[in-house]
Amino acid sequence: MTIVFDTADYDIKCSPVGVGKDPDNSPEYSAGNGNQGRSGNTLGPEVPRISTDKVSVKKSDSFNLTAVVNDQGRGGNDIIQAQWSSNKSTNRAPNRRSNMSASDGEFDQPKEDVNRSIDTAGWATGHHELSIRGTDGNLTQGPTNSTIVNIAPLASAERAQIVSSRKTRNNDGDGVQDTVKFTLENTGSSPVSIQNITIRDAENFQVDQVGNGSTVFNRGWSWDDAGPEIVSSRTGSLYDSTDGPVPLRTTVQLQSNEVVSDGEQTEYTITEFRDNRFGGFGSNEDPGSQVTLTLGFEDGSEKTVTLDNL
């Protein structure tokens, strides 16, 4: 038998069928959601308590959703199911209800504590309304109860990843590999803005400064500025010192706004690592196979990375 429904509301009742004998049913009809069932109960279990272990969750992290589902005083049937859903479409819960677990391992009581660990990978940032409803042994679903969880975007430092690094010459004719390049990728879904860079350490213990240029004598020694110390393949010059080399472990505030859009890569160049001899105007030096630096972002987060295998 095929029953075709139009877009109207229906009150469905199903008369039990016996196999080889008359069915033992009382009342006459068995029914599901919102209708009269075996016990005559029409309320369904309530959800008096619902909570999360975190009010705000970083995107891609997990949180625990817990609730109490109670049919006591509302028919007294055992709870047989609890389900949750989110009001926003996500990869893991696209507006469909998903089952929760009984905290004691089995649905066999009129009052059950329920839980679910939820992974937020693929969730949109912002507030999500999470709803839970229960179903009792009478197949009656009760009213929903809801709570809010906020999915916070990842900090800029968590989205910014170093994908490659290398060492090269500065084309000044001395043949020294005194320049380091590294590529940063924004793996998040919103731009990151770099505000400052601190070059912390180099494997070569003689290196103590970074500066592009040379010393000149014109009525005394001075610094011949030959271009920026820090350069972006996207923006161009980010820092250009006219006062000589910059000591390592000095936080350099970038002179240009440097924004890397989501999903994009930018290569950065740090030019002319130098030694620490008297006057600060020592020769260019190979920094070695490792350079450690810290990137400071507009949102206040920082990322310290060691460029290996240079």
Image: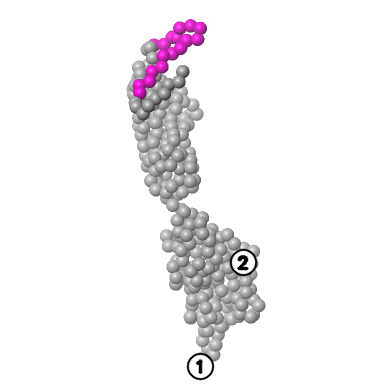
Residue 125 screen position, x and y as percent: 42, 49
Which of the two marks, 1 or 2, is nearer to us in this view?
A: 2
Residue 214 screen position, x and y as percent: 56, 83
- The residue range painted magenta reads 10-26
User: For this view, does 36 lie left or right of residue 21?
Assistant: left
How many neighbours does mark 1 have within 10 angstroms: few (below 14), some (14-19), or many (20 or more)? few
The structure residue drawn at horizontal position 45% and vertical position 59%, both measured from the top left corner, is 191
Is 256 placed above or below 142 here? below
Is 92 placed above or below 23 here? below
Q: Report the predominant secondary structure element of the magenta stretch.
A: loop
Of residues 20 and 156, the one drawn nearer to the viewer in this rendering = 20
Residue 74 screen position, x and y as percent: 34, 22
Is the C-beta separation of discs 1 and 2 under 8 Å?
Answer: no
**Residue located beneath label 2 in the image:** 166
**Residue located beneath label 1 in the image:** 219
- Locate the C terminus and report the quarter of the image it occupies: bottom right
Dot 1 amino acid type: Arg
Q: Secondary structure at mark 2?
A: strand
Mark seen at residue 124:
none
Q: Secondary structure at mark 1?
A: loop
The structure residue drawn at horizontal position 59% and vertical position 69%, both measured from the top left corner, is 180
Q: Of the residues under marks 1 and 2, which one precedes in the sequence?
A: 2
Residue 239 screen position, x and y as percent: 48, 73
Dot 2 amino acid type: Arg
Of residues 195 and 200, the one drawn nearer to the viewer in this rendering = 195
The structure residue drawn at horizontal position 62% and vertical position 74%, both measured from the top left corner, is 169
The structure residue drawn at horizontal position 38% and vertical position 20%, both measured from the top left corner, is 12
Q: Which residue sits furthest right?
A: 175
Tell me, yes or no, if residue 35 can be seen here.
Answer: yes
Tell me, yes or no, if residue 200 can be seen here.
Answer: no
**Is 3 included in the stretch rendered in magenta?**
no
